[in-house]
Amino acid sequence: MIKFFRLIVIVLAVEALFFVLLRIYIRSLRYEKLERIWDERHPDWAGDNPARDEFVRKSMVGFERSLKVRLTWAVFIIPTLAIMGIVYWVNWQ
């Protein structure tokens, strides 16, 4: 039983690490895309400036509620369900 709990802890730690890295990656892709959109719309204000930072910040607020960000939670759900299914299948068949 101790080995099972150790497995749970290790799996959750790996899932959490992967989840954080995936969220950082997805946010950085969206952030860069918003910066490119700003530069295309305002070629005379291209580069770092407070208006561009405000545009990106406001756009990122809506991004946090998007489907792409919500699907990152599948990083926890799918491997956990797979491990539970394998444990059930091996032990109780």
Image (cartoon, rainbow, N blue to C red):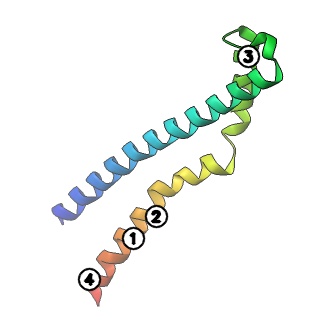
Residue type beneath disc 2 = Ile
Q: Which type of secondary structure does the marked residue at label 1 adopt?
A: helix
> Element type at marker 3?
helix
Find the distance from the CA under tag 1 to the CA under tag 2. 6 Å
Rendered location of residue 7, percent (x, y): 24, 59
Q: Nearer the viewer, mark 4 or mark 3?
A: 3
Residues 20 and 87: in front is 20
Residue 41 appears left or right of 90: right
Q: Position of residue 33 (x, y in %)?
A: 67, 33
Which amino acid does the dot numbered 4 rest on?
Val
Q: Quadrant of residue 5?
A: bottom left
Q: CA distance from mark 4 to mark 3?
A: 55 Å
How crowded pointer 2 is (Cα within 10 Å; few <14, some 14-19, many 20+) is rated as few
x and y percentages locating residue 14 in the rendered image: 33, 49
Q: Secondary structure beneath disc 2?
A: helix
Q: Indicate the quadrant containing the C terminus: top left, top right, bottom left or bottom right.
A: bottom left
The structure residue drawn at horizontal position 69% and vertical position 43%, both measured from the top left corner, is: 65
Instruction: Give the residue at mark 1.
Output: 82
Amino acid type at circle 1 is: Ala
Q: Residues within 10 Å of mark 4 (few under 14, many from 20)?
A: few
Q: Position of residue 47 (x, y in %)?
A: 68, 12
Q: Which residue is mark 4?
A: 90
Please say if the residues under marks 1 and 3 sit with CB atoms less than 8 Å apart.
no
- Dot 3 crowding, Cα within 10 Å, few <14, some 14–19, many 20+: some
Disc 4 on helix, strand or loop?
A: helix
Query: At 32% from the left edge and 47% from the top edge, which residue is drawn?
Result: 13
Instruction: Name the disc covering residue 78, or none.
Output: 2
Residue type of the residue flagged with mark 3: Arg
Tell me if residue 9 comes above or below residue 79 in the rendering.
Answer: above
Q: Which mark is residue 52?
A: 3
